[in-house]
Amino acid sequence: MRSPLLHPLASLLLACALACGSAPESPRLDTVQPPQAFYGTPEHLRLRGAFAPDLSVDLGSDAPPSLENRFEVRIGSERAYAVRFLTRDMLEATAPATLPPGRHDLTVIDAQGRASTLPGGFEVVDRGVHRLVFVTSMRSAHTGEWSEPIRVELRDGEDRPAPTSLPRVVRLTSDSDTGRFARVGGNEPVPSLELTLAPGESGVDLVYRDSTPGYHTLEGSSLGLPPIAQTVAVGRLGPPHQVRFTQLPLSPLRAGEPAALALEVLDASGGPAALPLTGIRVELRTDAPSGGLARTASGPYHPALVLTLQRTEGRLPLLYRDTRGAAQVRLSAHAINQDTLTTLIPDNQRLSVQPGPTHRFEVLRDDSGPPRVGEPESFTLQALDAWDNPTSYAGPVLVGTLPPDPDFSPGGVTLEAGRASLSAEFTQVGTRALVIWNPHQPDVRGTSAPLVVGPGRPVLLRVTGGGGPQRAGEPFALTLEALDRFGHRAQTPLRVTLSALGVAQGALSPTRSGTFTGTTTLSVTFTTAVHETHLRFEEENPEGPPGLSATTGDFTVRPGPTSRFLVEDTADSPTAGVAFPVRVRAVDAWGNPSEDVHELSLGAEGLSDADLSPTRFASFQGEATVSLTLTRAHVPTRLTVEANGRRGQQTKSFTVRPGAFASYELKGPGCITETDNWSLSLTARDAWGNRVSSYTGKARLSVQPKGTPSPGETASFVEGGTHLQLSLNEIHAPQAHVTITARDSAHGGKQGTLQLSLQRSCR
């Protein structure tokens, strides 16, 4: 049997063993989850690491030894509470709600005072206070009595209660001079209440009373937060009797700007009514087509609203907005008690709406035709608000264009009663819009519809091209432009005539252009060579004198290539052996003297080269007078010229006259006898053997070596010749040759001879 002392003894031995054993390890803190919490909210934490607990042994008890949780957790300077040992690697604790925002060191301390710290291991995040709200709905109270509690609270961005991290003052006021506030369970009634929320607090409860019946507005405010409002109904709170618009604006409304007003449900005394559980059905209307009612600023706005007001909605805040100016706008309210189905006394109110501030300018073009540069364009300017209501803006505006037109005018104009007329002048072609803006508010502006600005009327003809010398017969290009006064090509159709100084009408083509718009390219041809000329262009105007004109610079028209040669006819018959002039010209296809240099070959029809001198003419250019000599007379001929395959000749033939008488040509029989009478012919010749038809002299005859001719002298020559029967006397030398000599009777030096064979018989 086991001794009763065995168990205590075993416990003692175990305690001694544990006490004499190695000391427990120091705590180690590694992580904390979650690592952050929102300010003002207690947060349950789990700490992970290594945590050795203390061993507890009760020597006076039969209970076995136990592990004690003797850990302390500090977050910053504050102690966490509800610390609990879960396992050797996990503790649990709760962070206090009073921790200030920011990062805090997290420290775990065991029973021996050993600690482990996680620097900045825990963060308290301040969600921030975004707004102040009345948490409770509309309250009501009898006259002079306290209302039910009204709670005011701070909220964060997600509409959750937000404890303040710093002391924050909340101020409460009433629109009633007789209204009084008090904190629930506290202070004397005051006209306005200032409450200070301590760090960690998010709201406060208060009550309100008033000795004046009516719907009273409570307003709450705090530094840096939007103000708030809440309605309290004070009065007898009788049954609903009428509805009435209140808080109507005293001044005219501005178009587009919501105006705050309210609809109140009143009892027969004119004070707030007690609404039934089933509510009051209200129908609100406006007769303005552009007007609308809404319950909140975010809308939507409707010309008619049908609502059911519940017990806490005796006063209905409303917003009215109208986007059109009007002298009078009617608002009506009709209501039915849905409990008794009785109709409440309705209400009608009238408002006026004025235009809002000038938001933009309307720019309208008065003219309908296509705009042109340099021509005034009429515009009407009207100042408008954001809803297109005309405003009465008076003052200067600046005027410009998009894209910019550097020389556009005018640069500004003054509006009176919101309106002005403007005469504008564009200087650049293209798509442009007129822009108006307020010099003091550049974002208040207006733009016209895009205008396709075309060129203005033509005021200038400009011709380009065609410089340098031209050649007859070869076309060259000229560009003709019709420009407005700003240098843009005009779009007005034009026709022009062409003329050239010193050039006949037929030597220039074309002499008229076709109809063109803006610009045209002409192919111009001269057929006459001119040392200096210029082209003149004149606008055709069928109803009056010529319009626009332009002139090219001076230039030269050179002849074309040689096409043919012209040889001037010889009017008077030249004399053989006597040089006579002949004019030769090389011309192009249009008869202009050529500038080509040629080596001419000269000739005469029917004559050999031996009959003509010279037969070549070198370095011939254009035209020249050639001195020619022909030696053959009596033959009709024409002079010819040839070079480089081109030929020319005289149109009429001529005959060369013989030269001066130089000698005789004698003709007789080949054989004569001493006693024969034989025929002898004599012809007067010039130096080149041409018969001199004009010679009429006589010739004396003589015979050599001896003999006496009979007759001894010829008769006068006729047409340069003569015939005679001749016999020789006293010749006694048969079978011999004799020479007959004929000498001019006037000029013995001019003679001719004939040798004859003298025979006894010529048979």
Image: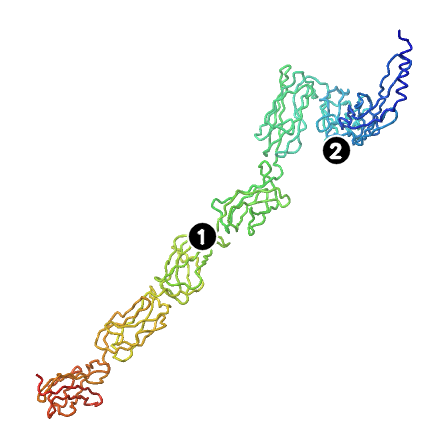
Where residue 729 appears, as percent x and y from the top left, is 10, 91
- Amino acid beneath label 1: Gly
What is the CA distance from the residue labelled 2 to the residue labelled 1? 70 Å
**For the image shown, how many numbered marks are present on the structure?**
2
For disc 1, the marked residue is: 518
Using the image as rendered, state which of residue 532 and residue 73 is in the foreground.
73
Q: Is residue 546 visible?
A: yes
- Amino acid beneath label 2: Gly
The answer to whether residue 474 is left or right of residue 748 is: right
For disc 2, the marked residue is: 224
Residue for point 28% across, 69% down: 649
Q: Quadrant of the N terminus?
A: top right
Depicted 658 relative to depicted 524: above or below? below
Quarter holding residue 513: bottom left
Where residue 677 appears, as percent x and y from the top left, is 9, 87
Q: Tell me the SS state at disc 1.
A: loop
Where residue 548 appears, as percent x and y from the top left, is 44, 57
Depicted 335 relative to depicted 494: above or below? above
Using the image as rendered, state which of residue 139 and residue 624 is in the foreground.
624
Looking at marks 2 and 1 on the same chain, the residue that comes earlier in the sequence is marked by 2
Using the image as rendered, state which of residue 517 and residue 587 is in the foreground.
587
Q: Is residue 195 visible?
A: no
Residue for point 41% across, 63% down: 470
Where residue 653 appears, as percent x and y from the top left, is 24, 72
